Each structure stands twice: as C-alpha cells, then as structure tokens.
Image (tube, rainbow, N blue to C red):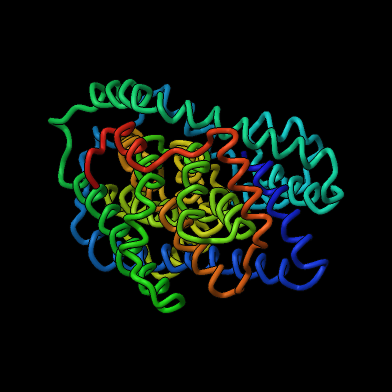
Amino acid sequence: MIVTAMIMAIQRLRTMTQGGGKAGKLARWTIGYYVITTVIAVAHSCLLVGLVWSKLMTVVSGEQLQVDEADQETLNEREAFEIYEVVGDMFYSLVPNNVINAMATDSLLAVLVTAVVLGYCIKPGSALIRAIEEIEQIIMKIITVLIYLAPVGVFFLIMPNLFRLDIAEIGVNLGILIGGTLCGMVLHLFIIVPIIFFAFTRKNPYTMWMRCSPAWITAWGTASSAATLPVTIRCVLAQGVPVTVTKFAVPLGCLINMDGTAIYFPIVVVFLAATQGITLNAADYIVVVLLSTLASIGTTPIPSSSLVLVVMICGSINVPVTGMYAVVVAIDWFLDRFRTMVNVSCDTFAAIIVTKVTGIVDDLEDNLQDAHADAAHGANVDSNTLRETHGEGKV
C-alpha cells in the first residue's frame, strides 16, 4: 500500500509540476512539519515529566527491581545495540541492498525511498503505471476486508494481556505512567496541534478531527499506522485534500510522524529511573529529547515496536533496566493504541496544513479518474460502517 501510494503521488507531482519546484516545496514542508511537531511533542513531554510526573513517582523495593532470567536474555540482546548504531543504520537503510528483502523484513524507510525513485523514473501513462493503479485498488480491497475482521483479532490480542497482568500489583507508579502518558497525548492532540492547525488554516480543528473519526478509531483498534493507512487516506481525501498531497504526506507520515511515540519515550525512561531513585539532570533530558526524536522517526509503524528503543535510550543516559521494564511491557498493549491514534490523527492534520501552505491542487481530470477507479473497484467504505465494525455506535 505504501509503495503504490507513493509511486502514484510522485507521478502526479511530476505531471503537475513538469519538473518545477512544487514537488520540492511539498517535500520540504511535509518533512519539516513532521520533524518540528515531533520535537515539540518530545519537548513538552519532557517538561511535564520533569516538573510534574517524576515528583510523584516513588522508589520501589528491591524484589520488584529484579529481572527474570528469560527477560534478562532479551534485555542483553537489546542493550547490545547502541543508539548511535540504530540511528546510523536508519540512514544507511535508506538505500537497500535488496529491495525484495527490504519489503519482506519491513524495512519501510528503504521501501519508501525506492518507491519515490520508481515513481519519478517510470514514464507517465505507461502500462506499468496502469498496472500499479490496479494493484493499488486490489490492495485497498484486501485491507478493507481485513479491517472488517480486525475487531475479532483485537479481542483475542487484548484478553491474554489482561489475564497476565496482576491487577493487585498495580501501584501508584504505574498509574502515573498511564495517566502521564495520556495527559501528554491529550495536550498534544487537543491543544498544541489544533493551535497550529488553526493558525495555518483558520478552520475548526475539532470538527475536522471528528470527520476523520474512522481513521483514528481504526488506529486505536489495530495499533498500527500501516494497517490504518487506507482508511486514513480515504478520510483525508474526503476533507478535500488533493490526491497528490494525500498520497505523499499520509504514507510518509505513517513512517516518520510518530508524535504519540515521541511523547511516550520520555515518561517511560523517567519511570524506569524514578523507581530506582535516579533523578535525571538537564543534560540527561536534552539527550532524551534528541534520542526520542530520532528514535520515534525510526520506529516502524507496527504494534509495540518502540519497546526495543526504550532500552537503548535508557542505556544512553546510564539508567539500568530493571524488573519494572516488565511492568511497562505488560501495559504497553494498552498505551500503544492511544499512541497510534495520536500518530494517525496528526497525519490528518498535517495533510490539510501542507495543502494550505503549498497551494497544490489536483487537476480535475485526475480527480475524476480517481473517483471512477474507486467506484469501479468498490473501494469506498463509509464512516458508519467503520464505526459499526469497531463497535463504535456513536462518536
């Protein structure tokens, strides 16, 4: 889905601009916006954690800090990777040695770069482009069917986690971890991003967010930005965003715009530190901001992928990973759904802001062709159906 959407977006940009500067302007504004909002998300998360949440956390007993042997093996494997190695590998992975292997191993940044290059090199109107359009419609139909089955999968995913979590052992620290994470996400999603959105568009951000409810409801259910991508694209297109901007900004945001994940990293790191009686200084928080920004961009859009990077960030500021990490793992399935919902919601805001800033519009002929293709392949799914699918009778 990411490959076909990005190829078609680059093709439309190439045709529209005839090699002019609009393509570069779209790329600059989209990437710049994503990076800036991610830095803002990490910064206000660190401020809240340092000034409020860390003061409320308490040191736990030695028994709770012990790590099981099986968990210790996993931690040793994760600690073997330095954060700079991960960041370096992220840049090296932009150019894959084997494209097929990159797709098979979910090296999505490499897949994205490859799709951009292919989209620029393929001749417009060629038979290959028509084949890619057909593949895109087939993938849309397949993922639509999977979305209908998602509630069943989510149910069986959640229940085992609930049974493994001993409710009697949930203490104040875990409550602060959950509450602090959700408060940071609420602040970002309902105050900071809407202010930015209104400043650029002069439109009501909350009305737009509600109109895109199928996307963030699906994101909460699947805990995967990649699985939600087709629904996000439909919702953004329904807001009048040009096809070119939508199919460039949304798939790119699915990969690098992880504001919810960026908010999550600082509070988890401080949680692991505070439960051991470790107080982070200003230099530590600066390191956390930088590493959380890079790590969130490099996080894959699949469930709970950020758990590996938490260990690396802790190691970079000399915070030992103790048995409390198992508590984070036990509750991560719950918080991951809200992180994904924030990530997808921010993608919808970004697409409209970038459209306003760049002034890009689609040709009428392109819009008619897209509408005809959607109708012919039955790719449209209305929002009421999506709400019923995910058990949301009302929003």
Quarter of the image for residue 114 reads top right
Q: Which residue is at a point 38% across and 23% down the rendered structure image? A: 153
Please indicate, yes or no, whether residue 310 appears anywhere in the rendered image.
yes
Q: Residue furthest left?
A: 168
Image spot of residue 65 (x, y percent): 29, 37
Point out residue 294 in the picture as x, y percentages from the top left corner: 56, 57
Location of the N terminus by quadrant is top right
220 in relation to 362, above or below: above
**To which quarter of the image does residue 12 belong?**
bottom right
Q: Can you say whether 190 is above or below 143 in the image?
A: below
Q: Using residue 146 as the reference point, say whether residue 136 is left or right of it.
A: right
Residue located 65% across and 37% down the image: 136
Q: Nearer the viewer, residue 268 or 351?
A: 351
Q: Position of residue 61 (x, y in %)?
A: 20, 39
Numbered marks: total: 0
Q: Residue at x 24, y 37 (%)?
A: 62
Q: Specify whether residue 66 is in view.
A: no
Residue under the image location 18 percent in, 57 percent down: 56
Is residue 33 found left or right of 68 in the rendered image? Answer: right
Query: Would residue 191 be found to the left or right of residue 305 on screen?
Result: left
Viewer-side residue, 196 vs 260: 196
Q: Nearer the viewer, residue 331 or 361?
A: 361
